[in-house]
Image (tube, rainbow, N blue to C red):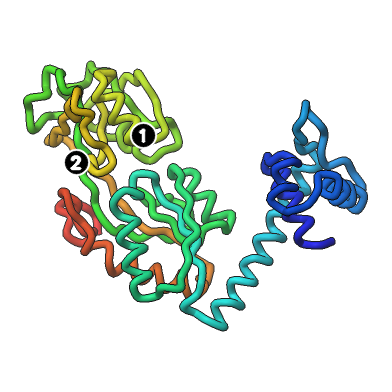
Amino acid sequence: MDLEVLRLFRAVARGATVTETAAKANMTQPALSRALNRIEREAGAELFQRVGRALRLTPVGTVFAGHVETVLEDYDRGLRAVAEMVDPEAGVVPLAFLHTLGTWLVPPLLSGFRDRFPKTRFELRQHGEEGLVRELLDGTADLVLTSGDPGCPAIRWKRLLVEPLRLAVPPRHRLAGRRRIRLAEVADETFVLLRPGYGLRDTTERLCREAGFTPTVGFEGEEVETLRGLVTAGLGVSLLPLPQTATFPSSGTEPLAPHLTVTDVQSSRDLGLAWLADRVLPPASAGFREHVLTAAGELSGDGRSPAGRAAGHRP
């Protein structure tokens, strides 16, 4: 079976329509349908079922799709390995990272590395912590930038920075004029949090427990800047990383939510780099890992501390 036919199958299995897939492959829809039918004949089972105008995987098709993903990923990794042996400086680095790191940490790390190795390409993905762990375990990312040690024996994690978390309150909140606050003072407030599965959600709930209460959740979101906007709109309070004014300017009609220093609990989160413990990384990814471990401390700012200099943090 042609690998390109398997790529077509994977595209449709991931949710693309036959029309979209055929157009991207520069082929006709009937030709694509014949290719999918050929796969089903070779598999000896119906892999798709039609739901309206879309094709959806059958239970058998779902099992087959998992093996197709493995075959194609192994093949692509093989191509990468050969290409990097021929020209180590022209490799590809599959990197996944937290959404919040894309505004300040990731860009200078990438540009600094490409200053030295301009032919290196990056495949970038953004997730919450659970998605980042999956990227590593599935082999779709060589490295991930995340918060906190994933706690998985198969993954090695190295702390890079300690990032402070501040209590964001609405601009007209009773505490908006303060600069410092005890977290226990907002025990009765409504909190705006990320959905379960995000590390910042777990960190917030843990810090609230340390302060003696369980937060009342009024709203849940999937991005920190969305939470900041909800706080600014007066919908609750939230423990958040310091804002990046380049990505969250004031609208001119509503000032940015004040961010108060928390004094009764250690309100911060660890940021680090993770990779599979037993995997030898390709040269480009191994080089980028060393670059990150060396450069991250030099990129700290806005109260962020290099891992080795964070007062009160474990080594």
Residue 310, horizontal then vertical, whole percent: 18, 55
- Secondary structure under tag 1 reads helix
The residue at 30%/60% (across/down) is 108
Q: Which mark is residue 121?
A: none
Residue 131: image location, x then y, percent: 50, 45
Compare residues 77 and 183 and report the one nearer the observer.
77
Image quadrant of residue 274?
bottom left
Q: Identify the amino acid type marked 2.
A: Gln
Residue at 46 percent of width and 58 percent of height: 95
Q: Quadrant of residue 212?
A: top left
Give the percent coordinates (x, y) of residue 193: 34, 28
Image check: 76 left or right of 107? right
Residue 6, by quadrant, is bottom right
Q: Quadrant of the C terminus?
A: bottom left
Whether the residues at callouts 2 and 1 have beta carbons within 8 Å, the answer is no
The residue positioned farthest toward the bottom in the image shown: 86
Tell me the tag on residue 201: 1
Of 231 and 59, which appears nearest the observer? 231
Q: Is residue 67 visible?
A: no
Q: Which residue is mark 2?
A: 266
Q: Residues within 10 Å of mark 2 (few under 14, many from 20)?
A: few
Q: How many marks?
A: 2
- The x and y percentages for residue 58 are 80, 37
Circle 1 packing at 10 Å, graded few (<14), some (14-19), many (20+), is: some
Q: In this rendering, would 161 be left or right of 63?
A: left
Question: Helix or strand or loop: what does disc 2 sit on?
Answer: loop
- Three-letter amino acid code at the position of disc 1: Arg
Quarter of the picture holding the N terminus = bottom right
The tag earlier along the polypeptide, 2 or 1, is 1
Question: Residue at 84% across / 48% down in the picture?
Answer: 36
